[in-house]
Image (cartoon, rainbow, N blue to C red):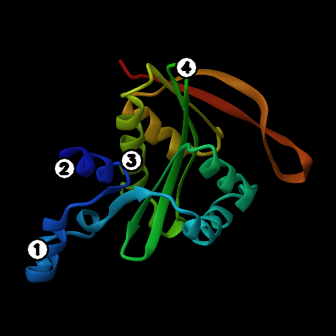
Amino acid sequence: MRGLLDRLKDFVIYDADVEFYAKVFPDSVGRKDLMRLRKMKRSDLSQIVAIEKSSYPFPWEKDIFQDCLNMRYECWLCELGDDILGYGIMSMAVGEAHILNLCVSPKEQKQGIGRKILEHLISIAKKEAEQMFLEVRPSNTGAISLYDSIGFNEIGVRKGYYPAENGKREDGLMFALELL
């Protein structure tokens, strides 16, 4: 029975007590406490793609998200009720974890959602990986600030990594985090 409960926790991070207290004592539980993390499903992709398109000038298309699900990458989202607030996708292989996409809906940013998702992905990665990597645009100062605050270190630059306006390219800053 315990094994079944542990496997269930791999799909949903949820605290029933919080929901109970929110219903019985509405002022005792904050909005952030009601947010839950769970694995992404195909039925989530329309909301995910809408967030992606509202967040980036060069968003991922639905087929990329489908490929990530097919590859069984760690695809997690943060939701409140039926609303998806943000999501993160991570691949893992040969002792390394790579954050492929971390995005929070523009209307939900600066509320700790990105941190919550990233910390969850880090906790998963620590079970199998020694290092975590990611790339970020130099212009994405909010994300860089988050990565710095968690302990990521800038380790290099990928020249012309991202598409940019007018057919130009923007560098990608490479960050790494030691997980040991």
Sequence order check, earlier mark of 2 and 4: 2
* Rendering coords of residue 13 (x, y %): 30, 55
Callout 2 environment at 10 Å: few (<14), some (14 to 19), or many (20+)?
few
**Mark 4 or 3 closer to N-term?**
4
Question: Which kind of residue does numbered mark 3 sit on?
Answer: Arg
Helix, strand or loop under label 2: loop
Look at label 1 and name its amino acid.
Tyr
Q: Are marks 2 and 4 in contact (CB under 8 Å)?
A: no
Residue of label 2: 1
Question: What residue occupies the far right of the structure in this picture?
Answer: 167
Q: Is residue 120 left or right of residue 172?
A: left
Say which residue label 1 marks.
21
Q: Secondary structure at mark 3?
A: helix
Q: Nearer the viewer, mark 2 or mark 4?
A: 2
User: Distance from label 1 to label 3 (Cα)?
Assistant: 24 Å
Give the residue pinned by disc 4. Answer: 94
Sequence order check, earlier mark of 1 and 3 = 1
Q: Looking at the image, do the residues carrying marks 2 and 1 touch, with CB atoms under 8 Å apart?
A: no
The nearer-to-camera label among 2 and 1 is: 2
Q: CA distance from mark 1 to mark 4?
A: 43 Å
Disc number placed over residue 115 in the picture, else none: 3
Closest to the camera, between mark 1 and mark 3, is 1
